[in-house]
Amino acid sequence: MEQDSTDIRPGERLAHLAPAEDACLRFIGRIATPFLTREDCPRQGDLDGPVCRLEVDPPWSDALDGIEAFETIEVLYWLHESRRDLITQSPRGDGQTRGTFSLRSPVRPNPIGTSCVRLVRREGAVLVVRGLDCLDGTPLLDIKPDRCAYTPQVAEKAADHG
């Protein structure tokens, strides 16, 4: 996405960068949400928010096996419409300018979004969830059990034998 250097707020600075070529991500599907524009998206997801769908591509459908055991999961996604060149930002309505890494803004050098969502149900290669804050059609990067809900089996076995 070509960035418009005139589309910055007072106090913001941008980096003039060559196109990035140092990483390769593999999208595993798409996200379906009711949010069609950035203005529609909530600032943060809400576990009681609208129903959304994580539509996993066929080669990855079996990778969902066992996910139903978790009430909450972490979703990583690529914020494909975000600019990637701001060093400092002035959040809307905030009036202050801060460094990009001190904000949860979707505008980042690598616009990876994360949400902890409530898993409603699995429908084959689709996870129905609540709690997302991204645009309809957002590329899906990864799905993980919520780190707070996940206890590795090694730790469980050690506790049983302790």
Image (spheres, helix red, strand yellow):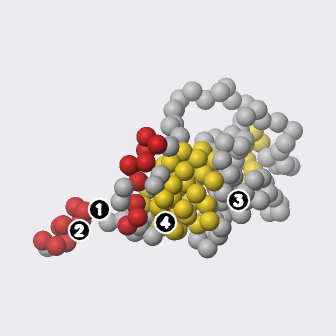
Precedes in sequence: disc 4 or disc 3: 3
Query: Residue 65's x, y, as percent?
Result: 36, 55
Q: Decide: marks 4, 3 in contact (CB < 8 A)?
A: no
Q: For the residues marked 2 and 1, what is the alpha-carbon distance in whole angstroms?
A: 7 Å
Label 2 with label 3: CB-CB less than 8 Å: no
Q: From this view, report whether residue 77 is shown above or below residue 84.
A: below
- Observer-side mark, 4 or 1, equals 4
Q: Nearer the viewer, residue 50 or 156?
A: 50
Q: Earlier in the sequence, mark 4 or mark 1?
A: 4
Closest to the observer, 78 or 61: 61
Q: CA distance from mark 1 to mark 3?
A: 35 Å
Q: At 52% across and 32% down in the image, what residue appears?
A: 23
- In the rendering, at what x and y percent does residue 129 appear? 55, 64
Residue marked by disc 1: 152
Q: Which residue is mark 3?
A: 34
Label 2: which secondary element: helix
Q: Which residue is mark 4?
A: 121
Q: Nearer the viewer, mark 4 or mark 2?
A: 4
Q: CA–CA distance between discs 2 and 3? A: 40 Å
N-terminal label among 4 and 2:
4
User: What kind of element bears circle 1?
Assistant: loop
Instruction: Say few, some or many: other residues with alpha carbon within 10 Å of mark 1 (under 14 / 14 to 19 / 20 or more).
Output: few
Task: Give the label, 2 or 3, closer to the camera.
Answer: 3
The amino acid on which the numbered mark 3 sits, given as a three-letter code, is: Pro
Dot 3 surroundings within 10 Å: few (below 14), some, or many (20 or more)? some
Q: Determine contact: label 2, label 1, CB under 8 Å.
A: yes
Q: Quadrant of the N terminus?
A: top right
